[in-house]
Structure formats: structure tokens, C-alpha cells
Image: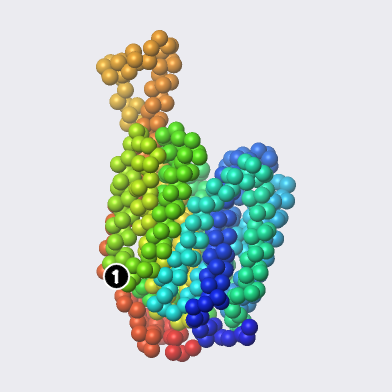
């Protein structure tokens, strides 16, 4: 297939080639997103086999996230240097090779190192798959087609633990990595057959900017992942990590303003209000999605004492609701405006979280299904629309870089969500436990009645029952309180609808927007408009 400049990659007509592009992007995005969580269930098996502690083995997850975040941020730069097809093919091959190396590793240091490399190679896969889909269809069809991509991106983290648990339990934890070999082989065939080429553009790399970007993202990710274990700001390590990340972030912003498109990332893309708002909303919704994936298993298995298989069925129903929402999203645009769809999605998500917060310890498994379905359905209802709206004003040659920044914010949203929920859960459970314990006194008639009802057992045994009851109640109360916080935050996101702008007509797309800082001259070089390509 002949090469054509990135800004001349034309949409494909409906037919076999376009359908196979959709299949390819879904396959690639699902492969990359599953590996973010596939090893979480297998960590105890890995710890035992590698003679590592539970805290040590979590670096297998942390370093993958670090590597992925670094490369996602510079996907646009790499795509211009190598060409889209060469980059995505290199990424898949490197991903498979590093997966094999992870499975063959004999100690923790080796597997952590190879896991970091695996994260580096997985970084370009999700943003490039999004950019490929956007190029393949006309603007009015993007929301509908991006629904397929969203199924892969958001469904992968939910499927990962289930697939990883099955492989670790019935085969071996190393198959969590080796399973990528046949999957990667299929991906290579699809890429070679259907992905269109874009030329590489000789250009210099801003190595200093890259260094600051690596410093900012790596210290931020490590700090977020290790904060709970090190007790946050009471630890000098966490303070130093966040300080380095903050300073590096300021330098990146300053250099980005001064260098413009010569910087390692083009922060001028954030001058488009729609792009900026979509990134912010996706970050917030990514946080709420991970919150549900964390809270639901804790509620069902730890709090209510359900079997893991029962909890899996309920959470699987949540995923089915998400798939339904993603396919409804594109078709909903025929009846509702973007703002109306966005507000409706926020209201559905917020209502789902509020319903989740009103559950109790007496619910059956089918009573737990509707709230989670509403949350995931609402998020998927708007996610494809946001993924399309973010690129409405970006010129075609900026799509790879825009996809990188869009997915970087989503990845950071996952990290912030995981961290925020973990911290709220730990602190809330401790606070609720302390409050309930303070209400217990030997003279409390209710306590005496409860102890008498336990029958003829020792006093110590009775108090052990009380302690277990307090732990469970504190845990349940904390989960429902966090759900209320999520409901409040999700309802609040609806306010952002008033700030979205209609897409700029194609002939007038340029840099001007909510952040029109062109008068600063050489201190801010504007992004090229579509007409200048």
C-alpha cells in the first residue's frame, strides 16, 4: 500500500478494509489494556515462587504502569519519527518479546526490569489504535466507531484479573505473560495486512525535555503506587518523589511554552478547550471506573463473604452494561446534542453511585447488579463521544500526539483513582473502627444482650466475635461512604457541560481558543492549523 502523508490519510468507505481496521484497533487496545491488571491476582503465586514479600512483588505492577505512562506521553513524537505503521509493529513485537522474558525470569529483579520494558512497548498501542480509528472514518461517524475501541480500552482492565486468576490457578503464573505470544502473533498479521502507512519525518529529539518528562511521570507513578505502603507524607521518600515530579512538571510547562512544537510534547494542544475538557473528564471518569473495580470485590468478597465466583458474575454483569452503553453512545447522537448526552451520562453514573451507597449487608447478588450496571453504562455512554469530541478541532497531523496526551491523562486517572480509593478506604475504615470501639463499654445493655445471645462460650471468644463484627461493619460503612463521595463528584462533573464549545468549522481551525496566547510571540509557537498542512 503506498505511503501517504499523515495529513492526507483519508477516511475509508464502509467495507472490508474499514471493518478490519476496527477489528485490528480493538484487538490491539484490548491486548495492551488487559496487561495493566492481568498479574494482580497472580501476585501471591509470584511472590511464593520468587521468594519475595507481598510489598516487593507489587513492583511488577508499578513498573509496568511507569513504563507505559512514559511512552504514552511521547507517542506523537515517536510516530512522526518512525511512521505510524512501523511504530505500532515495533511496539507489538517488543511487547511480545518482553512478555516472554517476563515469563522466563528467575528472580524478582529480572521480572521487574522486563515488566518495565513491557510497559514501554505497550505505551503506543492504545493511543495509536485510537488515532487509526479517527483517521479511518468521517467525523460524524467517529463516536459510533470509537465505541468498539472503548470496549477494548475499558474492558481490558476489568477482564485482566479474571483471565490472570484462571491462568495462575489452573496453569502457572508465567502464562500471564506467555499468553501474549499467540495474541501478539495475530496482532502482527493484522497490522501488516491492514494498517496504513504514514511516512517518518526526520526530526531532532528534545532529549532534555524527554528527561524531565521521564522524571515527572516515573516519580509521580511510583509515589502514587507506594504512598499507602510508606504512609504518604510522613515518609521522606514520598515527599521527595512528589517534589521531583512537581518541579519537573513546572519545567515541562515552561519549556513547552517557550519551545512550542520543538518540545518533546506539544502542550499547545491544550489551547483547544474541548480537548482540555475531554482530557479532564476522562481522567475523572477513569478514576471512578477504577474505584468501582476496587470497591465491588471488597464489598462482595471481604464485606459480605460471597464466593469469588459469585462476585465475578456480578462484576461481569457490570461489564455487560458497559458494552451496551458504548454501543448506545454513538446512536444516541441522532437524538441528543453532545451536552445533553454528557449531562445524561453524569446523571446516570451519579445515580448509580448513590444507589450503590444505599446497599446493605443483606442484599442478594442480583440486587447488587443494577447500581454497578448504571455506573459503567453511564460512563461508556459518554466515553466514545468524549474520545471523538477531543479531536474535533485537531488537525490530522496532530492526531497521534493528541491521542497520546488524551490517553496519558486517562492512565493517570486510573492511577489517581486507585490511590484515592485505597487511601480513603484505609483511613475511613480506621476512623469508623475507632468511633465504634469508643461506643463500646461494659455497661452498655445492648452489648451485654449480644454477649448473652452468643451462648455458653468464653468471654474472650465472645469479644473476638464482637471485634470481627466491628471490623466488618467498619469496612461496609467505609465502602458506602466512598460511594457517596463518588456520587457527589460524578454529579459535579455535569457542570463542565457549559464550558464545551461547538467544533470549529474545518476551514477556520487554528490555534485560537480558550487559551489564546499568540500575542506572546516567540514565547508560544502556535500549533499548525489544518489548512497549513
Q: Could you say which quadrant of the image residue 422 lies in?
A: top left
Residue 286 against residue 304 in the figure, above or below: below
* Residue 79 spot, x, y in % from top left: 58, 76
* Residue 405 spot, x, y in % from top left: 48, 69
* Residue 142 spot, x, y in % from top left: 43, 73
Give 195 or 328, whichever is nearer the viewer. Answer: 328
Name the residue that disc number 1 marks. 335
Give 288 or 228, whichever is nearer the viewer. Answer: 288
The extreme top residue here reads: 456
Give 309 or 165, whichever is nearer the viewer. Answer: 309
Q: Is residue 471 visible?
A: yes
Quadrant showing the N terminus: bottom right
Q: Could you say which quadrant of the image residue 305 lies in?
A: top left
Residue for point 62% across, 57% down: 116
Q: Is residue 189 found left or right of 158 in the rendered image?
A: right
* Residue 322 spot, x, y in % from top left: 42, 56
| Crowd tier of the residue under label 1, counting other residues whose Cα lies within 10 Å: few below 14, some 14–19, many 20 or above | few
Residue 129 against residue 295 in the figure, above or below: below
What is the image's colouring? rainbow
Q: Is residue 80 found left or right of 423 in the rendered image?
A: right
The extreme front residue here reads: 15
Residue for point 53% across, 65% down: 26
Residue 356 against residue 519 in the figure, above or below: above
Q: Is residue 244 found left or right of 116 in the rendered image?
A: left
Task: Tell how many labels.
Answer: 1
Circle 1: element type: loop
Residue for point 51% across, 54% down: 157
Residue for point 64% across, 42% down: 170
Q: Could you say which quadrant of the image residue 388 lies in?
A: bottom left
Amino acid at each position: 500500500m503506498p505511503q501517504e502523508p499523515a495529513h492526507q490519510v483519508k477516511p475509508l468507505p464502509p467495507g472490508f478494509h474499514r471493518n478490519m481496521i476496527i477489528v485490528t484497533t480493538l484487538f490491539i487496545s484490548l491486548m495492551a489494556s488487559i496487561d495493566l491488571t492481568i498479574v494482580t491476582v497472580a501476585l501471591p503465586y509470584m511472590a511464593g515462587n520468587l521468594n519475595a514479600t507481598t510489598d516487593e512483588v507489587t513492583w511488577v505492577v508499578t513498573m509496568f504502569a511507569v513504563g507505559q505512562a512514559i511512552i504514552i506521553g511521547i507517542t506523537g513524537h515517536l510516530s512522526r519519527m518512525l511512521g505510524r505503521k512501523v511504530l505500532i509493529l515495533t511496539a507489538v513485537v517488543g511487547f511480545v518479546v518482553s512478555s516472554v522474558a517476563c515469563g522466563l525470569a528467575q528472580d524478582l529483579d529480572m521480572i521487574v526490569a522486563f515488566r518495565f520494558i513491557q510497559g514501554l512497548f505497550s505505551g503506543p498501542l492504545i493511543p495509536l489504535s485510537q488515532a487509526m480509528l479517527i483517521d479511518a472514518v468521517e467525523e460524524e461517524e467517529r463516536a459510533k466507531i470509537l465505541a468498539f475501541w472503548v470496549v477494548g480500552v475499558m474492558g481490558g482492565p476489568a477482564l485482566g484479573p479474571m483471565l490472570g486468576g484462571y491462568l495462575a490457578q489452573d496453569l502457572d503464573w508465567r502464562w500471564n505473560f506467555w499468553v501474549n505470544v499467540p495474541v501478539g502473533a495475530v496482532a502482527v498479521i493484522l497490522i501488516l495486512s491492514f494498517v496504513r502507512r504514514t511516512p517518518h519525518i526526520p526530526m531532532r529529539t528534545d532529549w532534555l525535555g524527554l528527561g524531565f518528562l521521564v522524571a515527572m511521570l516515573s516519580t509521580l507513578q511510583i509515589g502514587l503506587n507506594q504512598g499507602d505502603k510508606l504512609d504518604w507524607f510522613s515518609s521522606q521518600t514520598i515527599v521527595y518523589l512528589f517534589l521531583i515530579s512537581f518541579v519537573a512538571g513546572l519545567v515541562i510547562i515552561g519549556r513547552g511554552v517557550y519551545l512550542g512544537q520543538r518540545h518533546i510534547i506539544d502542550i499547545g494542544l491544550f489551547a483547544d478547550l474541548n480537548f482540555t475538557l475531554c482530557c479532564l473528564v476522562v481522567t475523572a471518569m477513569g478514576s471512578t471506573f477504577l474505584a468501582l473495580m476496587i470497591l465491588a470485590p471488597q464489598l462482595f468478597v471481604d464485606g459480605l463473604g460471597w464466593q469469588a465466583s459469585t462476585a465475578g458474575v456480578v462484576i461481569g454483569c457490570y461489564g455487560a452494561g458497559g458494552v451496551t452503553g458504548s454501543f448506545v453512545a454513538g446512536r444516541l447522537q441522532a437524538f441528543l446534542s453532545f451536552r445533553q448526552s454528557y449531562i445524561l451520562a453524569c446523571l446516570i453514573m451519579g445515580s448509580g453511585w448513590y444507589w450503590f451507597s444505599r446497599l446493605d449487608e443483606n442484599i442478594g447478588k442480583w440486587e447488587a447488579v443494577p447500581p454497578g450496571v448504571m455506573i459503567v453504562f453511564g460512563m461508556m455512554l459518554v466515553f466514545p463521544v468524549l474520545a471523538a469530541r477531543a479531536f474535533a478541532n485537531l488537525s490530522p497531523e496532530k492526531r497521534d500526539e493528541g491521542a497520546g496526551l488524551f490517553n496519558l491523562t486517562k492512565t493517570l486517572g486510573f492511577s489517581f483513582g486507585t490511590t484515592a480509593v485505597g487511601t480513603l478506604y484505609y483511613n475511613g475504615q480506621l476512623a469508623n473502627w475507632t468511633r465504634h470501639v469508643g461506643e463500646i463499654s461494659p455497661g452498655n445493655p445492648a452489648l451485654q444482650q449480644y454477649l448473652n445471645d452468643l451462648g455458653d462460650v468464653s468471654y474472650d471468644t465472645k469479644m473476638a466475635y464482637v471485634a470481627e463484627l466491628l471490623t466488618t461493619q467498619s469496612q461496609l460503612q467505609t465502602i458506602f461512604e466512598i460511594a457517596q463521595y463518588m456520587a457527589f463528584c460524578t454529579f459535579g462533573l455535569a457542570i463542565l457541560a457549559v464550558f464545551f464549545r461547538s467544533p470549529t468549522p474545518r476551514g477556520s481551525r487554528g490555534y485560537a481558543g480558550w487559551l489564546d496566547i499568540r500575542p506572546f510571540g516567540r514565547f508560544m509557537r502556535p500549533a499548525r492549523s489544518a489548512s497549513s498542512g
